[in-house]
Amino acid sequence: MVKKIFFQSIFFNFFFLKEVFAAESGGMPQLNPEFWISQIFWLTLTFGIMYMILSKLILPKISANLELRKSQIQENIEAADKQRKDGDAKLKEYDDIILKSKLEAKNLFKETREKALESINSKREILEKQIDEEIKKAEQEINDLKKTAPEKINKIAIETSSEILKNLIGTEVNSSSISAIVNDLSKKNGNKYYDN
């Protein structure tokens, strides 16, 4: 408040001191009151012309440039937002495609694995059945051979013995007597070579 009063008193002192306004006393001629009307005229005319030039020529160009820049910036922002949204949509679509592909691959792998396991199991069952059948046939053949082997061996032994005796003695030997001897031997041995 004190500063305001101080500056006001200095300002009014300049108006009231005659020496300040007088050109002869070495003061400033701009502050001489006799030149004030012409100064105000030229000031008004100069600022009026400058105002007209600025308002009619320069400021419209500046405001047009500012509006153009503002619209371009707004368009760029909108384009960037649109591209960001498109990018987000594409990224989401890409993620969805990857997720679907992973699920399809997982399901395909699972189905293929199940089919392979089913095929392996069915082939194993068929193979086990075939092996069981072959084992049964082999066991049956072995049992049949066990049952018929003593008779065949006796028959072969009788024929071989008769041939050997015929070659040794030179005459035919009765096969019934040879078979009786072989049967006696087999009974004494208890058919140990033919029974389990």
Image (cartoon, rainbow, N blue to C red):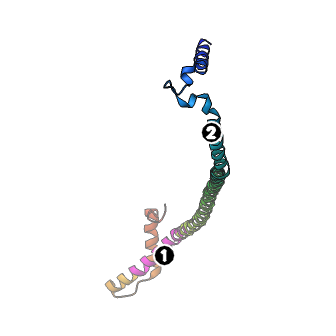
Q: Please name the residue that numbered disc 1 is placed on.
A: 152
Farthest-out residue, top: 2
Above or below, 10 against 104 in this view is above
| Residue at disc 2, secondary structure | helix
Q: Quadrant of residue 89?
A: bottom right
- Name the residue: 55% across, 25% down: 22
Judged from the image, the secondary structure of the residue bearing numbered disc 1 is helix
Q: Residue at x 49, y 71 (%)?
A: 149
Residue at the limit of the structure toward the left, as seen here:
168
Residue that appears at 59% across and 66% down: 123
Compute the Cα span from label 2 to label 1: 153 Å
| Span highlighted in magenta in the image | 142-160
Q: Magenta span has 148? A: yes
Kindly identify which residue carries mark 2. Answer: 43
Check disc 2 and give the amino acid type: Leu
Amino acid type at image mark 1: Lys
Residue 38 lies, with reference to residue 22, above or below; the image says below
Q: Is residue 170 visible?
A: yes
Q: Nearer the viewer, residue 24 or 150?
A: 24
Q: Nearer the N terminus, badge 2 or badge 1?
A: 2
Q: Position of residue 73 (x, y in %)?
A: 63, 51
Q: Main secondary structure of the magenta part?
A: helix
Residue 113 placement: quadrant:
bottom right
